[in-house]
Amino acid sequence: MHVPYRGQGPALTDLLGGQVQVYFAGIPSSIQYVRAGKLRALAVTTATRAEVLPDTPTLSDFLAGYEASFWGGFCAPKNTPVQIVDKLNSEINAALADPKIKARLADLGGTVLPGSPAEFGKHIADETEKWGKVIKDAGIKPE
C-alpha cells in the first residue's frame, strides 16, 4: 500500500518505528541508520552501486533498466541577471571542488556534479521528460 509522507523525516521515523516496512530513502538521509544497523539497505536506485554501500546491489540488477537518482541543485529567479547567475555558479562550483566539502558529501553518499547553468537546465529538462513519460504511461493522476 502506498503511504504518502510530507518528507523523509516523518517517513524515516515510521520506518524506524516499524509502522511501514519499506521506504525508498535517499542515501544522505538514511546512511547513518544503515551504518548503525537500524536499517538494512536492500538496493540502491542509481545506475551503479553507491560507494558508501559497495555491497548493496542496484535495483537494476533485479529490474533491468531501472534508474532513479536523488539530486539537488541551486536555482535563482527567472530574471536574475546573467552576471549574478555566473558568479553564483562560479562560487558554488568552487565550493564543490573543496576537498572537505567533497569528502563530507561522499561520506553521506552524495556525488558532486559541478557544471554550468545550461548543463543543469538540460538535466532538469531531461528528468522532467523522463518522469513525465513514466507518469503518463502509468496513468498517474493527482489525488
Image (cartoon, grey):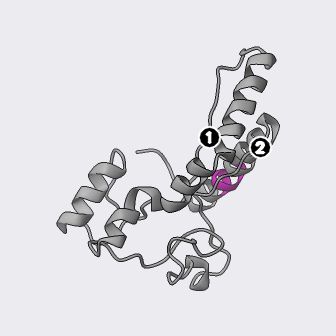
Q: Secondary structure at mark 1?
A: loop
Residue drawn at 36 percent across, 51 percent down: 8
Residue 115: mark in rendering: 2
- Disc count in the image? 2
Residue drawn at 59 percent across, 81 percent down: 63
Residue 47 in percent (x, y) is at 66, 71
Establish if 54 lies above or below 127. Answer: below
Question: Crowding near pointer 2: few (<14 within 10 Å), some, many (20+)?
Answer: few
Q: Which region is colored magenta?
A: 129-133
Q: Which one is nearer the viewer's eye here, 106 or 19?
A: 106
Q: Which one is nearer the viewer's eye here, 9 or 115?
A: 115
Residue drawn at 57 percent across, 72 percent down: 51
Q: Secondary structure at mark 2?
A: loop
Residue drawn at 50 percent across, 81 percent down: 56
Q: Is there any visible trace of residue 139 in the rendered image?
A: no
Badge 1 is on which residue? 73
Residue 73 in percent (x, y) is at 62, 40
Q: Locate the N terminus by quadrant.
A: bottom left
Left or right side of 19 for 113: right
Q: Is there any visible trace of residue 113 in the rendered image?
A: yes
